[in-house]
Image (spheres, helix red, strand yellow):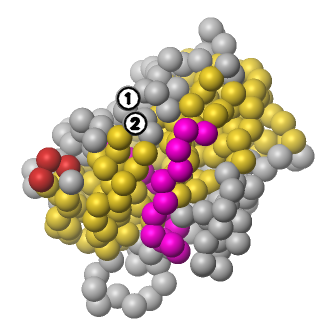
Amino acid sequence: MIGYVGTYTKEHGKGIYKFELDVEAGKFVSIEEAAETPNATYLDIQNDRIYAVKKGKTKAGIATFGVNDLETGELRFIEDCLEEGASGCHLTLTSDHNYLVDAVYLSGEIRLYRVDERGIVTEQLDVFQVEGDGPHERQDNPHSHFVIETPDLKYVAAVDLGADKIVTLEIKDDKLEKVAESKVAAGSGPRHLVFGDGGHYAYIFTELSNEVIVANYHDGEFFPVETYSALPESFDGHSQGAAIRKHPNGKYIYVSNRGHDSIAVFEIEAEGKSLKRIQIESTNGDWPRDFNVTPDGEYLICAHERSHNLVLFKINEDGTIERQEGEVEAPEGVFVGFL
C-alpha cells in the first residue's frame, strides 16, 4: 500500500514523502522524498492527481502533482496556482472535480479555485471572508481551519476555530455564497469534522477544548447535540485537538491530542447521535498532528510534527488500536493519506 506524508519545511522537512506499507506483514517497507515543495501541510489525493497546499516566497495557493505510476506512487510536478496571500491549511476537491476549495488559518478566508478538464488547478475564482471572534486568546479574529463538501453534495462546510462556528457555502456562478452559519460552544475552537454514514450527523473536533461535538446536520445547518472529552478526566496539562477520522466501516471515530500525545477512540452509538469513548492510547511521539486509517480499515498511521516519526497501529475488531514495531522518520509530518 502506498501512502504520502505532507510536511512543514521549516526545519528538515522537504515537502511530500512517499511510504510503502506491507499490509500482510504489518510494517513499513520504505519511506522517501516524493516531491520537494514548500510547506505541503495538507494534500488531497485523487487517483492520479495530488493537490497540495503551497507557500512560495510572496505568494501562496495550490500545487498540482501527477502520479506517474499508481503501483510505485512516483510523483511529477505539473503546475502551480499561486496568488498574493497567506497559505492554506486544508483543502478539498469537490465531487464534480470542477472546483477546489482551501481554508486559510491566518486570515479566516475560504478560497475557491477552478480545476480544468485535465484535473489541474488553474485559477483562483473567489475569496470568502469569515467574520467573528471568540473569548480565547487565540480567537482574536477568524481562523478557518477545514473545508469539506457536505454529504448532500450541495454545499461546502468551512470550520472556523477563531469564530467558533461552521460556515456553509454554496458554489454558484464561480462564487462562494453563504447559506448558513452554525455556532458551537464559545471558546471551544472547532478545527476538523467528519460526517457519519448516512450524512445526518457530523462529528466536530475542537482544538481548544479537546472535545468531539456531535451535531445533527440538515440542509446546510449543524445543530450540536452532545459533547465528549477526548482526554482522561485526570489530565490537567496542556493539550490541543488535531485530527479526526472515521473508520471505513462507519462504526468508530478517532481523534489525536497534541500535548497529551494520544489517540482517543470512540464507538458510534444510537444510529449516530451519540458516542462512547473506548480507548485513549499513547501515540509514541511528540505532537501527533495528523493520522489516517488505511482504506481497508486494518491500520492507523500517525505522523508527529515535533518528534518526526511515523507510527503504525493495528486496528482490532473492536475498534481499539495497538502499536506495531518499526516506526520510520518523517520530518515535520502534518498530513497522512493514501493512494
The amino acid marked with disc number 2 is Asp
Task: Nearest to the eye among marks 1 and 2: give it.
Answer: 2
Residue 164 image position (x, y, % from top left): 54, 64
- Is residue 97 among the parts visible in the rendering? yes
Residue at the (60%, 78%) spot, across then down: 135
Residue at the (46%, 46%) spot, across then down: 336
Residue 206 image position (x, y, % from top left): 45, 65
Left or right side of 118 for 283: left
Does the CB distance between marks 1 and 2 fall below 8 Å? yes
Q: In this figure, which residue is indicated by the disc labeled 1?
A: 152
Residue 313 image position (x, y, % from top left): 27, 56
User: Mark 2: which secondary structure?
Assistant: loop
User: Mark 1: which secondary structure?
Assistant: loop
Q: In this figure, which residue is indicated by the disc labeled 2?
A: 219
Residue at the (89%, 46%) spot, across then down: 58
Please tell me whether the stretch drawn in magenta is mainly helix, strand or loop: strand
Closer to the camera in the image, 16 or 32: 16
**Crowd rating for badge 2 (residues with CA inside 10 Å; few <14, some 14–19, many 20+):** some
For marks 1 and 2, the one nearer the N-term is 1
Closer to the camera in the image, 332 or 200: 200
Extreme residue in the top direction: 117
Residue 201 image position (x, y, % from top left): 29, 47
Q: Which residues are magenta?
A: 178-195
Magenta-span inclusion, residue 188: yes
Residue at the (34%, 88%) spot, across then down: 235
